Every structure is written in C-alpha cells, then in structure tokens.
Amino acid sequence: MSLINPQPPLNEADLQVPEVGDKNERWLSLARKAYDGSTEWVDTNLRYQWEKNISNFSSRHPPGSKYLTSAYDKRSKLFRPKTRTTVRKLESAMATAFFTNEDMMSISPANPNNPMQLAGAAIAQSIMQYRLTNTIPWFSTMVTALQDAAIYGTVVSHQYWEFEQKDETFASVNDTGENVVDLQGNPVKEKVTSTLKDYPVIEVVEPENFRIDPASDWYDPISSSPYVIHLIPMFAQDAMERIDSGEWKKITLEQLLTTTDETDDTTRLTREEPREDPLEDDFENVEEYKIVWIHKNIIRKEGVDWCFFTAGTQYLLTDPKPLLEMYPWLKDGERPYVMGKLNIEAHRVYPSATVELTEELQAASNDIWNQRFDNIRLAMNKRYHIRRDRNIDLDALFRSVPGGAVEMDDPDQDVRVIETRDVTASAYQEQDRINMDFDELQGNFSASTVGGARNLNETVGGMALLAGNTNMITEFVLRTFAETWVEPVLKQLLKLEQYYETDEHVTALAGEAGGVEGEAGAIDFGQDEVMDELLKQDVLLKVNVGMNATDPVGRVQQLLFGVTSVGQLPGMEGKLNLDEVSKEVFGLLGYKDGSRFLIPSEADPQIEELQQQIEQMGMMLETDQVKMQGRMAIEQMKVEAQLRAAQLKSQTELQKEVMSSKGEVGKLGIKQSEAYVKQQDADTRRAELMLQRDALLNQIVDGEIQRRMVEDKDNVSKTGTMARDKYNKVPYEIG
C-alpha cells in the first residue's frame, strides 16, 4: 500500500528536460554552479576540521587520531572530556548573562519626546517578551546557537513566520441541537477554517547545510554573498505531498530519490557516531521514508534577489520569485538569515571555533592521561623476560594471584622481572600545566588556574584578580555572540512582529503594557488603525549584555560604585533616587519587581514623574478633549481605590487592637500593617495617574492618526490580518 497520495500520470512533456537555452534551465544551471563551487570549498577547507571539532566536543578521538589505529588496541585510549567541560561552562555563563535579568532586551523610541514612539516601544517590548517566553523556545535556541558557534566557529539561523490553516466541514446545527437541512431535505454543511500555526520561528540551521560564497565580505557575509543556499532535509513523502498538491513542479518519486548523494552527509554522520545511523538502508525499508535534500536558493541577479526551490541540483521545483515577495517584511538587500560567531578573526568569513582553539591542548591532555594510565598498569602488572624452551607454568605466572605459586626449574636464570618506574607524579604536574593553559585560553577560572599562579592566589585580592581576568574573556566572547547573532536575530523577529502580528494579539498585549487587561486594554488603545500605526513606529532594540554579565554580584558592586562616585560630585547631594537604585540592585540579582521589598516614602518619585508627564500632555490637549471612556475608566478606578483603601484601613485598625496587647511583637505587626497600607495607597495613586496618562496619550495618538489618514488615505500601513489580506497569504516556509 502506498503511503503517498496517488498522483496523476505524467505525460512526456511534463518530464522533458528543458533545453540549455531555456529560462528555467539557466536558473537551475546557475544554482548548480553556486552549490558545486561552495561545496567544494567547504569540503576542502572546513569539513574535516568541523568533524574533528564535533569529535572533541563529543569526547571522542577525532578522525585520523593515533588512538584509532591497531597500534593502540592493547593500550590506554581514554578521552579526557576537557573540551566538553569548557563548552558547558560557556553555556552556564551564557545562561547567567542572558537569563538572570528580566531586561535582557530593551526596546526604546528613536525619539523619546514622540508620544507615538513611546507607546509603540512599550507595545513592541510586550509582544517580543511574550514571544520569547511563550512561543519561541528561546532558551534551548540560545544553547543550540552557542554550541554551533563553539563547534563550527559560526551559527546560522533562519527567521520566518509560520502560518498554516485547516479547512473542516461539519453538519450545520441549530440552537436546539438539530441538524439543519435544505429544501430538499439534505443536511447543510458548514465550512470552518481553523488556524493551526500563526507565530514567528527562529530556526537554527546546521552550518554544513548552509552555503555562501567564500569570497563574501567577512563583516557581513549573508548580505554581501551573491547567493545563499539552504539545504533542507525532508522525508520523500512530505516532498511528494507538495508536488501532488501543485505547490511544486511535477517530478516522480523515482526522480526525487536520485537527487540525494549519500556522501553529502558526512558531518551529520560524525555527530551520530558511534550510534547506528538512522538513515541507513536497514531503517529505510519504505522509499517514502527516505531523506531527500531540497535546496532553497537565493540568487542575486541584476541587483535583485530571486528565490526558488530545487530538488538537489537536478530539478527546478518552483519558478524564481523576487525575495521581497516571499519575505515582504525585509528591506531591499536584506535576507532572512543571520550568521553569528563567538570569536572575531579579521577578514575571515569562517573564524576559528572555540573548540578548535584548544585542539592541540586537548590532544596533549589525552596523551598525558593515557600514558599515566599505562604507567600505572605496568607498575602494578609486571612484565617478564623468560628464557625460551624452559619448563615454566606461564598461565600461573601471568595470572599472578595473591598466594599463588609458579613452577619453574631455575627461577634465577629462567625468569627476570622488568621493573617499571612510577612517574605519575611528574605526569600530574604536566597535566596541571596543560589544564592551566587550557583554562587561560578559554577564559575559565578553575582550580588548575589557581594552582598555576602561586604568587597571586595566596590572598583574597589575588583570587579576585585571577577570577576577574578569566571572566573578562568569557564576557567578551558572550558580548561578541550578542552583537553578531542575538541582536540581529531579535531585530528580524521584531520586523516579523511589526508586519504579521494579528491585531487582536497586539490589542491584548497593548492593554497589558499599559497596566490594564482585557477589554480595558482595547478601550485604552482604540481601533485597528491605531494598532497599525503604533506597531510600525521607529524604535530601537538593544541587548543589555555587557561586562560583568556573568557575575550578578559584580554588577551590583559596579552599580554601587557608580552611585557612590556620582553622589560625591558637587551639587549632587540629595539628587539620587535611592528607591530606583534599590530596585535596580534587586533587578540585577534576578528579581523582576524589586519595589515589593521597599517601604514607600512619602514622596514617591514615580508618582511625581507621572504627574509631570500628565502636565506635559495636558499642554498638548484641552482638558475637555479627553475621551469619555478614559474619564469613566479614571473615575471607576478612583471609586475602586477608595473602597480598597477603606477596607485596608478598617483591617489595619482591627489588627492594631488585636496586636496592642502583644508587646513588642504587636508593635512590629502594627508597623508592618501601616507600611502595607502606605504601599497600597501609593499603588492606587500610581494606577490612577497611569490611567489618566494613557487616556491623554490615546487622545494624542488618535488625533495624529486621523491627521495622517486625512493627509493620505492610501498610505496607512496594515499589519497582522490586514497585511495578509493585502498580500493574499503569509509566505509558506519549510520549517
């Protein structure tokens, strides 16, 4: 039984290979030349090193190692996992730097004085945070990207919007639960369209499945390369489904299977070793389950990027289309891929990998380790010189069990023990030296680092200096990773959100960004046109990972040093906001809301700031121009706040009466209750002012929108579902 849908018979014209002068063949020939040239360069210059790096990372002896020869069959051939340990430490440092703080990423308006940009930045921040927390597996994506950069020297990712709908037909039912029938008595069918996928995707691509021109600009290889080729492994039956549906051009299953060369997958096989390869013929007993390679080609011709799919390099699956039609959210010259790195090596498109930097030290560490084991074995298990043709019980001699005996004619003449001197002490010393070199190169602070610097580690200050020097290297590496991959990827993600995000989703998150939820959020930010205008505002995205990123305590110390230094400047006395400093300290330590640890002062700086904002906005609008719904929301909030304050005061008075008889403990409880009431009052007042500010901001935004719509009715950009209506569909991508 076939596992694919039966396809219509193909006629001779469908299978005819186009002539050389044919337009499609010219595109196919261009893609083939680009692939063959770049693959030859990768095979010659990169692949062997990649496979060695993968082996070292996996704690296996790399290809060509002496330990894989027959000469070491009887010798120690252990692998000391120093490389894997180093990468794991880097992963841990990355997690500390990027995931300890809530403000790893910040979005700010390009013009802080523009209320439209202020609102747009707040909404964009909320949407991005939601996607990275709930939709995109951001943590595992980051770890994968870091591992690729450490092993291959580069990390490649593909950013796109995944959109998929499903049409289902159901029998129409009335309010009473009965089936609806037409005049002829036939059941009425109702078509329901459900959305299965509607979200952005960050896909980390295996570097061996990505091709660019090796002569590209090392600073920006993706954009400068005349072509980009993404090799996509697929099950044959999945590819045939797209062929049968008409999405791709017609070719047969037999033709599709001929496009895959088994020798093109050696790097993946290195990763799978020593496990049995799941793609071997024994596993592929059904042709439809075999893996085929689909090429996604982006080729620049006459200044325009064209995109099309091919089956290997043999068959054209889609007609070339301008890249900006498939990815309308991109700017001219941009591509939906990002290539990042951990190490910057000037003028090299593919810099040395972190694993590669310590390759020789890893080999030396293995040698010392295995020689020490061999030495211990020889010292504990003696070897002998034995005369030929002597009457000796060899089995007993080699068995050498405690309390055993060996029969021989002349022990003094027939057998002589070969003594092996124990040199493990010097081996340990050399191992420590190699470990120290290893750690210094990678920027790790460990026991071996301390042991190699006796002049410094005798004091606490010396220990701190050693740790600081090593951490600086790690932090520099992570900063390079943030600048070359994390930030460009998040910027593309923001563009995707600005272009494809649904208006309903934006409205809900906009309400949350304004401090209100549900329907109130929709009231605050208004109609779809307002959403579109806010989301497309000019904003700036920045990844907040700098020095001391791997040391939260160090960041706190750095902040306090800065605060102390500024406080000592002339004229700065009393001008520092100590509440905000305290919140920042808790934030650096990983607490999302540090304000809950603070007792509010009589003069809340945030309340004062909100009052100033309202006064400034009031100068832009007449008081009677504020929306009625905004006024109603404010008044409702005030009523709720008054009721809540009354309840709290009543509870506090009751607690005072109960605790007044409990001595000092009771006094402490009273103070805590009073502090809690103050906190609630401050929160209430703050919420009132935020609602009032948002109502004013909404009025300003509405006025600006209406003015722009009057000036140019056709120039209003649409996002979300409205953009999809305009462009018919979200471009389909292979995930």
Image: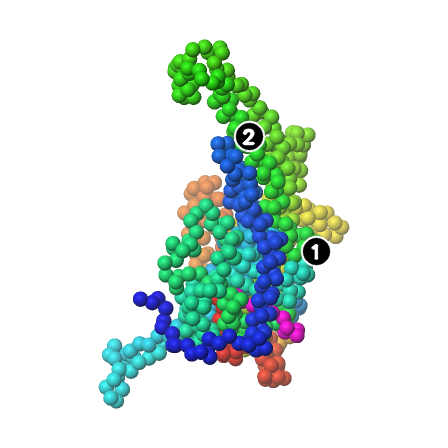
Report the magenta residues as a range.
295-304
Q: Is residue 582 visible?
A: no
Q: Residue furthest bottom?
A: 183
To which residue does mark 2 refer? Answer: 371
Q: Is residue 237 visible?
A: yes
Q: Reply above or below: 662 against 651.
A: above
Looking at the image, residue 141 sits to the left or right of residue 439; the answer is left
Picture quadrant where residue 449 is located: top right
Measuring from the top left, give residue 650's x and y in whole percent: 43, 56
Circle number at residue 347? 1
**Quarter placement of the N terminus:** bottom left
**Circle 1: residue type:** His
Kind of element beneath mark 1: loop
Q: Residue furthest front?
A: 389
Pointer 2 local density, CA inside 10 Å: few below 14, some 14–19, many at least 20: some
Closer to us: 235 or 604 = 235
Measuring from the top left, give residue 404's x and y in whole percent: 39, 15
State the separation of the CA atoms marked 2 and 1.
40 Å
Residue 563 shown in magenta = no
